[in-house]
Amino acid sequence: MKKSFKFSALDRQKEIFMRGMGNRKPLIPVSYAELEARAKEVLSEENFASIAGGAGKEQGMANNVEAFSKWRIVPRMLNDVSEVDLSIEMFGRKLASPLMLAPVGVIEIAHRQADIAVAKAAAKTQTPFIISSQASFPTERITAEMGDAPRWFQLYWGKSDALMESFVDRAEQSGCEAIVLTVDTKLAGWRVRDLDLGHLPYLRGKGIAQYTSDPIFQQLIHEPLSSPISKPKPSLGAIATLLALNWRYEGNFFKNLFSGLPLKAVRKFVDIFTNTALNWDDLTKLRESTKLPILIKGILHPQDAQKALDYGVDGIIVSNHGGRQVDYNIAAIEALPDIVRVADGKVPVIMDSGVRSGADMFIAMALGASAVCIGRPYVYGLALKGASGVEEVIKNMLAEFELTMRLSGCSRVGEISKGHLWRDSGEGLSIPERTGH
Ligand SMILES: Cc1cc2nc3c(=O)[nH]c(=O)nc-3n(C[C@H](O)[C@H](O)[C@H](O)COP(=O)(O)O)c2cc1C
């Protein structure tokens, strides 16, 4: 039986204020700035940097957020908004709302329960969860927490096609309903905060559970590396890291130490992750590997959107990876309208990067997005309160979205249109109704 999620912004407000009557603050801060600040307090310097950081001077990351403020919402009055419906439909399935959880790798650095906790919150709120190729638990273990709640799988397509096929196969077996191919991360960006601290969690065996649990990867480990990887200079720190790696790896610590398997796994992961040769024609190969809808994540240029359509993708995620790849990147919300125009209602266009509030969601939907993803906001909720923290972030986002809708005169998501927006350049207020998915 399908679970439903009953939600009301008014109940959410009541819940928070009733708590306040007992002198109790909300479980996690409602304001994004405070949420991030509190997460910073509980995380180590290295782990916070890995989550919060962006590429270069982080202007691209800032653009994602600032670009929302170029738009003004123009509420419409005296529509009957006594009933409100946040649901949307995508790929033939009704979804509780247009909010989705972006794939975020290596979240064990935020909380021990990592993707398991996120899966629980996603299932409870019926919010689609896009499981990362770099999750901290295998897909099978994550989806076991989700009943029949919606989940997709995000694919990083490295050097091994066989591994890519195995990941896709496992996702299908685990009830994932779409494959999201991330195309903006052939290489990791120049992330200054991580570089300054010399900290890369993968080298410590974190965020590689999808690989180490995979039968194809377990064979690949024993094959020679395609290029040599230098070893760290012997030091107390290096020995401590190696011991921690052996503890973390599944199985017996001493057996791991003796076999050297954990270190071999990390080196093989580093060896095959980067696939700079990936190109448009590879999409055909992916199409042959699955019957699931394929979405492409990381599109910012309308010509790339057109190309993706020509190659038959089923959906586009407009994203710049939260500003983590290219400094000074165009904000995802700036890239959205042209891509919506190209997609022309043929496939869903999901907006990702920089969404911090329900009002941001409203602007993205008004500009023609079919849904939006959030990344860092839910990871901070996770860092503070595990599954309950993620649930709180989702509910706060939905509450503001619902209130913004109703206060702007909309009772259904499909009623949100560019006619609710205005911009100094004279844009907005012209298109009466957006095409929905
Ligand atoms: C710590 C971290 C890890 C990420 N890992 C992945 C990943 O494994 N796969 C992926 O497609 N995107 C990954 N992303 C990007 C997110 O899916 C998403 O695009 C981004 O977080 C959205 O921006 P926001 O954080 O501003 O909401 C990651 C982002 C962060 C912050």
Image (spheres, helix red, strand yellow):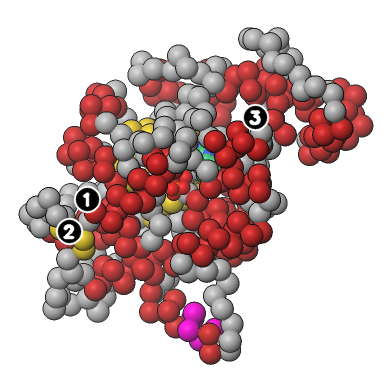
Judged from this view, the residue extending furthest toward the bottom is 21
User: Amino acid under label 3?
Assistant: Tyr
Which residue is pictured at 92% across the width and 32% down the height?
254
User: Which residue, given by chain and number where applicable, does mark 1 sit on?
Assistant: 367
Which residue is pictured at 59% across the width and 45% down the height?
49
Magenta highlight on residue 230: no
Instruction: Say the numbered circle drawn on residue 211.
Output: 3
Is 44 in front, or is 368?
44
Which residue is pictured at 51% across the width and 30% down the height?
190
Image spot of residue 194 (x, y percent): 60, 37
Q: Is residue 186 visible?
A: yes
Relative to 322, does residue 365 appear above or below in the rendering? Answer: below
Q: Is residue 333 left or right of residue 124?
A: left
SS class, disc 1: loop
User: Which residue, given by chain and number where applicable, does mark 2 sit on?
Assistant: 421
Relative to 353, does residue 203 appear above or below in the rendering? Answer: above
User: Amino acid under label 1?
Assistant: Leu
User: The magenta stretch spans which residues?
Assistant: 15-19
Q: Quadrant of residue 421?
A: bottom left
Which residue is pictured at 39% across the width and 74% down the height?
8
Residue contact between numbered discs 2 and 1, judged by CB atoms under 8 Å = yes
Dominant secondary structure of the residues highlighted in magenta in the image:
helix
- Of callouts 3 and 2, which one flags the residue occurring earlier in the amino acid sequence? 3
